[in-house]
Amino acid sequence: MAVDAHAERSRCDGHRPRRRARLVAAAVLLTSAFAIVAPMTAEHVLPQAQAAPTEEGRSVLSPLVELVLRRLNTADAVASAKWTTSQRTGQAPVVDDPVREAQVYDAMAAAGTRSGLPQDWVRQVFTGQIEANKTVQYGLLSRWRFDPAAAPASDASDLAAVRPVIDQVNGEILSRLAAHRTVLDAPDCAQQLAAAVFPVLTSGRVDALHGAALVRATVTLCPATYVK
């Protein structure tokens, strides 16, 4: 029994360097793509509402990336709600919400288990989503502090109305993870992911802030660090 356990640990340890290398590869590819297109979009502050790409030229992972972008774009409403609340209460807006974040991680990990997905991978993915969302929030809040004229109106957003949307998209992302697990778990996951993300970065649908956050959110989709 001890021998079997040792063999299993050795097998898992052997996977880690390869998986970590794939995560690094994904990060390099996506960051390089963003570095190319960021100057094209740097003059924009908020993402423009434009149509999603047509089926022609779409990567197999494009639907998943579109969901990630949809979730990411909720950060604008979340930041707006936190800003208006801070203006009403006189307290600084708070981006981090450990209780809410823990609820999301636990709920998604449990749902992922029911779908046969490794909990470590699911937590990795949603860590990426939450941290990317917070990146946008911090960026917008900082801008509004320095440019109050660009800040949202006092009744711009309601955080309670945004969270059900986020919860719905979380579930859809989880479904896509299950549907595309073979592609995401393949050695060329980074290349497939870059092929799906790059068209979004060059489409004019995201500005520099949201583009950087999109890279942060998508780089965790390749299951490169969890142990099967």
Image (cartoon, rainbow, N blue to C red):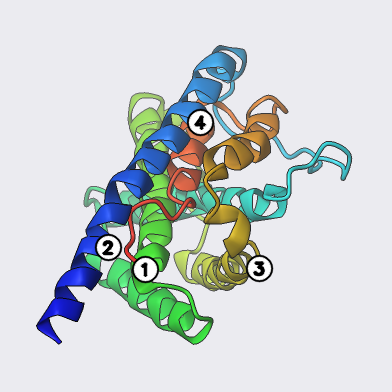
- State the mark number for residue 12: 2
Whichever of callouts 3 and 4 sits on the residue coming sooner in the sequence is 4
Label 3, label 2: how many angstroms apart (C-alpha)? 24 Å
* N-term mark: 1 or 2: 2
- Residue occupying image coordinates x 60% and y 61%: 182
| Amino acid residing under circle 1 | Lys
| Residue that badge 3 annotates | 179
Which mark's residue is nearer the viewer, 1 or 4?
1
For the point 55% across and 12% down, which residue is it?
39
Image marks 1 and 2: residues in contact by CB distance under 8 Å: yes
Of residues 13 and 147, the one drawn nearer to the viewer in this rendering:
13
| Residue position marked by numbered label 1 in the rendering | 228
Residue type, label 2: Cys
Of marks 3 and 1, the one in the foreground: 1
**Is residue 95 left or right of 117 when viewed as pictured?**
left
Q: Earlier in the sequence, mark 1 or mark 4?
A: 4
Q: Quadrant of the C terminus?
A: bottom left
Q: Position of residue 106 (x, y in %)?
A: 34, 78
Say left or right for 96 vs 220.
left
As drawn, the residue found furthest toward the front would be 3
The answer for how far apart the CA atoms under marks 3 and 4 are is 22 Å
| Mark 2, secondary structure of its residue | helix
Q: Nearer the viewer, mark 3 or mark 4?
A: 3
Instruction: Tell me if label 1 and label 4 are in contact, CB under 8 Å.
Output: no
* 90 to the left or right of 57: left
The span from disc 1 to disc 2 (Cα, nearest Å) is 7 Å
